Image: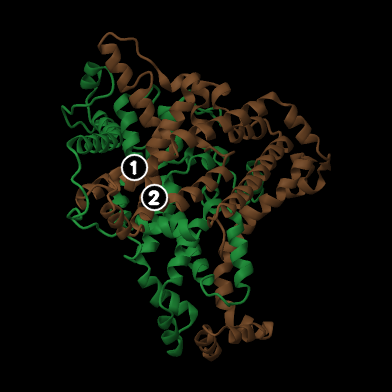
Chain colours: A brown, B green
Amino acid sequence: MSTAPIVKDTLARPATPKLAEARRRPLLVRLRRDWPFLAMTAPAALLLLVFHYLPTIGNVMAFQDYNPFEGKNAFEAFVNSEWIGIGNFLTLFEDPAFWEAFRNTLAITLFQLVFFFPLPIFLAILLNSVISPKLRSFVQSVVYLPHFFSWVLVITFFVQMLGGAGLLAQEMRAHGLEPWNIMSNPDTFIVLVTAEAVWKDVGWGSIVFLAALSAIDPTLYEAAAVDGSGRWRRLWHVTLPGLRPVILLLLILRLGDALSVGFEQYLLQREAVGRGAAEVLDTYVYFQAILPQQWGLGAAAGLFKAVVGLILILSANKLAHAMGEQGVYSKS
Amino acid sequence: MSAFDLPDRPRRRPVWEEEPSPALLLGKGTVLTLVVLAVLFPMWSVLVTSLASRETIDAVGGMVVIPREFDISAYVTIFSGGQVTRAVAVSLFVTVVGTAVSLVLTVLAAYGLSRPGTLFHRPLLFYFLITFLIYPGLVPSYLVVTGVGLKNSLWALILPTAVSVFNLVVVRSFFMGIPKELFDSARIDGASEWGILTRIVLPLSKAVVAVVGLFYAVGYWNAYFNAVLYIDDVDLWPIQLVLQSYILAGQSPNVTGAAVSLPGITAYPPTLAVKMAVVIVTVIPALIIYPFVQRHFTKGVIVGAVKG
């Protein structure tokens, strides 16, 4: 095919009126010109269609009494299953275990907002103040590493260090002390999961803040210093305002995700500490719906979570706009 | 690309900055040391224990901290066939094939979406980005994956997670930063879009492709929950599931109901050294690739965070 129109179009791009004219070209001409781009996008789009959009639409089974034996496969069963309105939601909202999972999830989110969220900011400021590039990149390499470990590995490390048969308990026993097992204590579980999350992701979380720090204009610091402000005043009046947009952005993302606290982490430890402490919404769906095959109930719980999450992120974004910040999706 | 990397700060303190007090320096040094030790010490102890003999482990009563010998018998045990060997092969297959599939799909789609003004450009972009906001529930996803016949197939660990829109946006942002003149001259020379992608764009994008490849590879190697959901056949278990059954068994859910009696190598419980050797085997792939791509992280994460 001829490349001339493409070249012309590309060259004409800066002038917007010409672009608009190009847009008015007949569909077939544009298709002939642009089909390679469409063909390249198609495979990924197809996978998303099957594994993202299809299940998203499938969420309407929350209003069904889904019965897998109504057809040869899941799709036929879906078509043939009986519609029962909001019955699944009534069952769900009457289940005390659901509300327990809901409470646990919110408690963990709030706890981590206070005790996890600020830590990457501290670490970034600390790292940024290290003058030697060698020392700084060494520490960075080390603290980013656990981000790449699976939850199975992270919990394994915690079990081997702090668990009942771990290094700490072993040393305490050797010195005649009563070992104390944090890995299976439901009362301190929220501290434990937060510690694990910090160990895994505090370094990784600091990257975004490090970048924001390096984008702060150094002359601001200089001017502040000349005006007589000390180290801590500069931190308060220059550094923190410089980080404000990033902090707000990440807070919004975290809020939108308030009902997901991670999944594998809780699944892996649920048996050790018991359901009372470790059941979160995602594990609730797994244990109350997928294992006992209560499909409608699980879909209702999933849909509830998705809708609440969507409302949360949209309102948090509104809030950010109201505060004069960019938020998550302002442009493009 | 270096525009996105952190600039090396000047090695000297600027003149206007006061010298830190000894107390502040001591405080900073202590915190940094503790942070580094908190990451490295558990890995060190696990490594040393995996290389310790049974006598040493019995003498100290469990985890070893000070190395006394170099005993590789635990590694010989797990690599002489059986469950762990098989699981490593399964995980390697999933990681290599999955990463290849993911990279091809991601690079193609990122290029396909990198030219504003092409047909359906904005609706398609919207189609991809909206997945950040709406996520399908666990139950419908499970029914779709099993419904398309992927139960007990390793493709169940690959296809549902093959395209990460986050990675796609990272790659697309990079492609869009390539100077337009390069594309124009290539097109004047008669190159097709495919030729431009393979001969101009990709050679310029090695760094971003490497980082995204690492993200994908780590995701596949770490695949755990999808395996819990979709793989009942013990012979197809990936390494994470085997690690869980070795170390955390009895602590965690058991989907198949048959796995507590460690399938495969032994009738008796594996020794501590063998368990720790499995941990090391699970850690190693990340450790091998990590140094090569580490210096590009900042870029990848920031592009994703800022433009995502």
Q: Are marks 2 and 1 in contact (CB under 8 Å)?
A: yes
- Tell me the number on the disc at residue A123: 1
The reply to whether residue B278 is visible in this rendering is yes
Q: In this view, does B16 lie above or below B48?
A: below
Disc sitting over residue B64 in the figure: none
Type of the residue with mark 2: Phe
Residue ranking furthest to the top:
A176
* Quadrant (top left/top right/bottom left/bottom right) for the N terminus of chain A: bottom right
Task: Residue B200 in the image: state x and y as whole percent.
Answer: 39, 77
Residue B18 lies left or right of residue A265; in this view the side is left
Q: In this view, does A207 lie to the left or right of B55?
A: right
Q: Residue, x 33% and y 45% (percent of image)?
A: A233
Q: Is mark 1 on a helix, strand or loop?
A: helix
- Residue A209's tag is 2
Q: Mark 1 lies on which chain?
A: A
Residue B239, given in percent of the width and then of the height, sits at 42, 39
Identify the image quadrant of residue B59. Answer: top left
In terms of secondary structure, where does tag 2 sit? helix
Amino acid bearing label 1: Leu
* Chain containing mark 2: A
Q: In which quarter of the image is the C terminus of chain A?
A: bottom right
Q: Which residue occupies 35% across, 53% down?
A: A213
Residue nearest the observer in this picture, A321 or A166: A321
Mark 2 or mark 1: name the one nearer the start of the chain: 1
Q: Which residue is drawn at 53% across and 71% down?
A: B112
Residue B153 coordinates in the image, percent (x, y): 55, 47
Residue located at (39% from left, 71% from top): B202
Q: Who is closer to the viewer here, A63 or A323?
A: A323
Q: Are marks 2 and 1 on the same chain?
A: yes
Rendered position, A308 above or below A158: below
